[in-house]
Amino acid sequence: MPSETRSAARLRLLIPEHEILARVRELGAQITRDYPEGPIYLIGILKGACFFLADLARAIERPVRIDFIGISSYGKGKSTSGEVKLTKDLDCSIEGADVLVVEDIIDSGLTLNYLVHVLSQRKPRSLRVVALLDKPSRRIQPVDLAYVGFQIPDHFVVGYGLDYAEEYRNLRDVCVLEEAG
Ligand code: IMP
Ligand code: MG
């Protein structure tokens, strides 16, 4: 990890690991209750959602299928470029499937709206979204979230999969990244 990045920024604990894991277990129990018979297709949005998806999948007491989709909208900055592009497509068809999109954080809503538009054209039986974190005050486009872990204020956060310029993903807690000075 480049030392200049570490020294230029400060981390402030926002959600400790034990609270994240307890909430993920609750979400898993709720999803287990809500879904009909048959497999749930969990679609993780790379790369930030992969830690959340791994824990959520084990908290769901149903058969699941797992796939990933790659979308980029941010590059290396902290705010949306407004441009969204598909960088990796699904491996499997989702036609007729109960699809649950797993996202790390909803900010402007642009990424998710683009993805929901793309996936709904593939005729899943149902299409819902679960997000670990939601920053509602940042919304540019409204989004329909079936499940949310935590609503958080307008801070840039890292950890538990979330990055800043590809760093901090392996922090166990969710922390606010504050500029020094
Ligand atoms: P949106 O399209 O503006 O809703 O952005 C969603 C995506 O931006 C997320 O999937 C994250 O990859 C990234 N993002 C938004 N806010 C944060 C943050 O606070 N920390 C890290 N990544 C973020
Ligand atoms: Mg993301």
Image: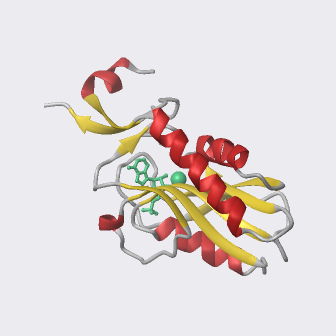
Res 30 quadrant in image: bottom right
In the foreground, 95 or 150: 150
In the foreground, 142 or 14: 14
Identify the residue at the far left of this view. Answer: 181
Quadrant of the image containing the N terminus = top left
* 174 relative to 118 in the view: left or right: left
Q: Is residue 19 above or below residue 118?
A: above
- Residue at image coords 53%, 58%: 131
- Residue at image coords 54%, 67%: 112
* 149 relative to 95 in the view: left or right: left
| x and y percentages locating residue 105 in the rendered image | 47, 55
* 124 relative to 153 in the view: left or right: right
- Residue at image coords 28%, 55%: 153
| x and y percentages locating residue 88 in the rendered image | 70, 55
In the foreground, 115 or 87: 115
| x and y percentages locating residue 56 in the rendered image | 65, 48
Q: Is residue 168 above or below residue 72?
A: above
- Residue at image coords 61%, 74%: 116
In the foreground, 74 or 154: 154
- Ligand 1 is found in the corner quadrant, namely bottom left
